[in-house]
Image: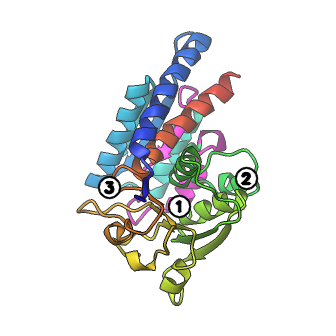
């Protein structure tokens, strides 16, 4: 039987269609105002510029507004914190996204922590992570939250399954592990110091590639029938997993591109919509 394609691009279009309706309902309640997502871009990294543009385009498609704030490559941490404070205090802004990575002179963690919790729609603050981990209300980190939405949509069973997450970044690997744990999966987190990584991956019912290295996870590490989720994207349209050699024996997989990426953006604008609805309620 052919592996099931976990089509994030298709699902994101369904989510955007429902968001259009929610925006219209919000406008009726708010007297014509619409939710606004503010994005902050520090420097002129081409990939980051592309990602910010894509997020702005998604806002436009569903009828939301976006505001792009650009700081120079030489900006300091204090200058970035000041800009975040301005957005925190702006009642027209419902969500704040700091595009990462930021230039090396900036304390990225300090910048993330400056974002007000009720506007942390990208799920990057320590407090938001802690609340999510404890099962309390918080906006989840956008990429892992998007993956969870995708798995739920395709009815991928998580309870009792062994999920292996390769990667431990604070906005992807770690929150991904906590979200899976909260759904009663048994979770193993692997990283660059993990010994005999291949043998651990071979035990996984669900493999999450979040290591940030192209095709680092080999197809023959994937056990027959496993679900493969690739959160990476690299030049040449490849992810963190060698999908070409895994597709033949896995049960389901996310394509690259068209799998996880569209779900990240869909989650970001969905959580911005939720922030607006919470405030007006």
The residue at 66%/56% (across/down) is 129
* Residue 131, label in figure: 2
Residue with the most extreme front position = 1
Q: Is residue 274 left or right of residue 34?
A: right
When the figure is inspected, residue 58 is found, relative to residue 44, above or below; the finding is above
**Viewer-side residue, 70 vs 269:** 269
Label whose residue precedes the other's in the sequence (3 or 1): 3
The residue at 63%/26% (across/down) is 277
Q: Residue 278's x, y, as percent?
A: 68, 29
* Residue 172, label in figure: 1
**Residue 218 can be seen, yes or no:** no
Secondary structure of the residue carrying tag 1 is: loop
Residue underneath mark 3:
73
**For the residues bearing labels 2 and 3, Cβ distance under 8 angstroms:** no
Label whose residue precedes the other's in the sequence (1 or 2): 2
Q: Is residue 158 left or right of residue 238?
A: right
Residue with the most extreme bottom position = 195
- Is residue 99 shown in magenta? yes
Cα separation, mark 2 vs mark 3, equals 33 Å
- Quadrant of the rendered image containing residue 74: bottom left
Number of marks: 3
């Amino acid at each position: 039987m052919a592996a099931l394609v976990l089509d994030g691009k298709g699902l994101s279009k369904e989510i955007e269609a429902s968001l259009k309706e929610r925006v219209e309902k919000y406008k009726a309640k708010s007297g014509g105002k619409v939710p606004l997502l503010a994005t902050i871009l520090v420097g002129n990294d081409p990939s980051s510029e592309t990602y910010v543009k894509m997020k702005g385009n998604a806002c436009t498609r569903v009828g939301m507004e976006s505001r792009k704030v650009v700081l120079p490559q030489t900006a300091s941490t204090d200058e970035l914190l000041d800009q975040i404070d301005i957005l925190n205090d702006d009642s027209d802004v419902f969500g704040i996204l700091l595009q990462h990575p930021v230039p090396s002179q900036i304390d990225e963690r300090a910048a993330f922590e400056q974002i007000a919790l009720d506007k942390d729609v990208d799920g990057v603050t320590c407090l938001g992570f802690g609340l999510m981990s404890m099962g309390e209300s918080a906006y989840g980190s956008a990429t892992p939250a998007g993956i969870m939405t995708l798995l739920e949509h395709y009815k991928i069973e998580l309870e009792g399954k062994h999920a292996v997450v390769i990667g431990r970044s604070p906005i992807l690997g770690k929150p991904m592990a906590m979200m899976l744990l909260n759904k009663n999966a048994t979770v193993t987190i692997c990283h660059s110091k993990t010994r005999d990584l291949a043998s651990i991956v071979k035990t996984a019912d669900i493999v999450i590639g979040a290591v940030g290295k192209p095709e680092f996870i080999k197809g023959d590490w994937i056990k027959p029938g496993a679900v493969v989720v690739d959160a990476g994207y690299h030049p040449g349209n490849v992810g963190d997993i060698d999908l070409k050699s895994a597709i033949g024996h896995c049960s389901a997989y996310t394509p690259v591109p068209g799998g996880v990426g569209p779900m990240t953006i869909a989650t970001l604008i969905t959580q911005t919509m939720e922030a607006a609805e919470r405030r007006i309620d």
